[in-house]
Image: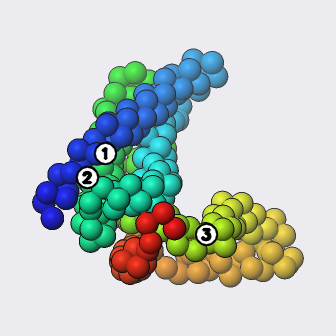
Amino acid sequence: MFQAIEKQFRVQWRECLGVNEIILAAGLFGMVLLAIITRVTGERESGFALGAALAGIAAAFISFLYVAVQVSLRFDLQISLGFTRKQFLFSWFVVEIAQSILAAGLVTLFCLAENKLYPFLYPGMRIDVNFLPWILRYGLLAAVALPVLGSFCGVLVQHFGKPAFWALWVFWMGGWLGVPRILSASRNMPESFLGKIGGELNRILEAVPVNGWAGLAAAAAIVAAILTWRILMKQRVGA
């Protein structure tokens, strides 16, 4: 298996380098953007680590969406080049999770740098949101779970085709667009149908502690890894 991991790394190291460059660029852009905002608006009373926030968003999207798109392409290519299915999947998970952990490390460095620099760059500014405790507590879990879940989604689309793609699209858009509207309705129109649903959803969100959601994410990643393994063991190349 070590040779398979080495081969996988040799295949992907340039892409890993490019991914980290994107995360670095996003973080630096966030820091520059905050400087522009404070200069234009004159707002220096409060702010947050915008560089770490944009770097974190970039890292999360890459760790999930990039992996979801690439897994089927890499599977077809590498199986045709002599990888066994077990070698491919094991080495794929190892390399992608390692890259995701490195991305989480870059986000952590941005957060540390901003926490140290901003008191000197913007004297008197209050940092409203400190991401560092959250990253230190849940960053490793996210770094492992996101590429595993991304691989699972990519394998579903590869195996089941358009039905799986559209099902995932509806789930994705429902999460990004539907849930915020439902929660907003619970505040603005609590007696409406959506408002009542939002109220129940709020109660669920408040009842489950953060560690509980982290446990659910870990369980989902384990189930996704098992299902990904089972599907790819039977997946035809080029199908």
Residue sitting at 74 percent across and 79 percent down?
A: 197
Residue 228 seen by the camera: no
Indicate the amino acid at tag 3. Answer: Gly
Q: Residues within 10 Å of mark 3 (few under 14, many from 20)?
A: few
Residue sitting at 36 percent across and 40 percent down?
A: 15
Q: Residues within 10 Å of mark 2 (few under 14, many from 20)?
A: many
Query: Which of marks 2 and 3 precedes in the sequence?
Result: 2
Vertical position of residue 124 compared to residue 107: above or below: above
Q: Quadrant of residue 161?
A: bottom right
Indicate the amino acid at tag 1. Answer: Gln
How far apart in space, not on screen, are marks 1 and 2 (Cα)? 6 Å
Q: Mark 1 and mark 2 in contact? Answer it, CB < 8 Å.
A: yes
Residue 185 seen by the camera: yes
Asked whether, in this view, residue 204 is left or right of residue 200, the answer is left
Residue sitting at 23 percent across and 44 percent down?
A: 10
Choose between 123 and 83: the one closer to the eye: 83
Vertical position of residue 161 compared to residue 31: above or below: below
Q: Which element carries disc 3, helix, strand or loop? A: loop
Q: Which residue is mark 3?
A: 161
In the rendered image, the residue lying farthest to the top is 39
Indicate the amino acid at tag 2. Answer: Gln
How far apart in space, not on screen, are marks 3 and 1 (Cα)? 26 Å
Choose between 176 and 38: the one closer to the eye: 176
Q: Which residue is mark 2?
A: 8
Q: Quadrant of residue 71?
A: bottom left
Check residue 12 in the rendering and tell me which mark sits there, or answer none: 1
